[in-house]
Image: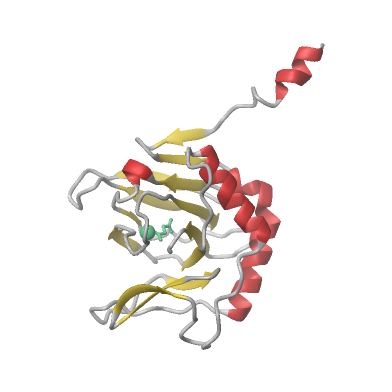
Amino acid sequence: MITTDLFGASQAPRRDEPLGDGAVVLRGFALAEESALLQAVSAIVAQAPFRHLVTPGGLRMSVAMTNAGPRGWVSDRRGYRYDPIDPDSGQPWPPLPPACMRLAVAAAARAGFPGFVPDACLLNRYEPGTRLSLHQDRDERDLGLPIVSVSLGIPAVFLFGGLRRTDPVQRVPLTHGDVVVWGGAARLRFHGVLPLKPNHHAALGECRINLSFRRAG
Ligand code: SIN
Ligand code: FE2
């Protein structure tokens, strides 16, 4: 029957889990570009290795970070900012591979943010015990544009709170290939990651890598 072919694609089960106005989990959305993403991570890290940044208050962050794209997020004693130059190498951050760009653009569009084009990708590396405390992402110029956050490697529990630090927090388990998008009314919601439990992933070993695509400038 023709109708099966006609409607097959559009009737595929959508595994989108809304987290409120402007925020959604797209389960497994990144698996379509899994090998491109893993290759991109190795290429980026070869040029700009993960490092532990220092907060403006002088604390060493437990998450190791690096960046790709025209702008990179950095923190030091002077504050948080985006910088086109990797302070460790004095060189521009590695480029954002086209497959990663396409994935971020497609995830944003599916989440209701068509036309989103990132110019920054922050890579976070978590090992068992690593956590990321509740924070807002607010160093970008346009705070309506979304964050597209791609999880790779071992599972983690993502904390998704409200607009005030003390608001109730949703616990969202994330696994390899899941994508979370938040923008618009959700853009300034507090979020973080619980300490990771020991685990092993076939491609990444004992580690989780999160890529968050942003429009910084
Ligand atoms: C972030 O808030 O920058 C990353 C969140 C995550 O690792 O899932
Ligand atoms: Fe964040």
**Residue 177 placed where, x, y %?**
58, 49
Q: Is residue 201 visible?
A: yes
Q: Which residue is drawn at the image coordinates 49% and 73% (left, top)?
A: 66
Task: Give the image quarter of residue 27.
Answer: top right
In the current view of this chain or complex, which residue is farthest to the left? 166
Q: In this view, does 32 lie above or below 7?
A: below
Q: Where 200 sits versus 27, above or below?
A: below
What percent of the width, then of the height, locates residue 180? 46, 47
Task: Locate the N terminus by quadrant.
Answer: top right
**Observer-nearest of 152 and 181:** 181
In the rendered image of this protein, does residue 22 appear above or below residue 78? above
The residue nearer to you, when weighing 12 against 142, is 142
Image quarter where ligand 2 lies: bottom left
Residue at 69%, 59% in the rendered image: 36
Q: Where is residue 102 in the image (x, y as percent from the top left)?
A: 63, 52
31 left or right, relative to 169: right
Horizontal placement of 162 versus 103: left or right? left
Q: Measured from the top left, where is residue 143 in percent x and y?
A: 34, 53
The answer to whether one can see residue 155 in this image is no
The residue lying at 54 percent from left, 65 percent from top is 206
What residue is drawn where x is 37% and y is 55%? 142
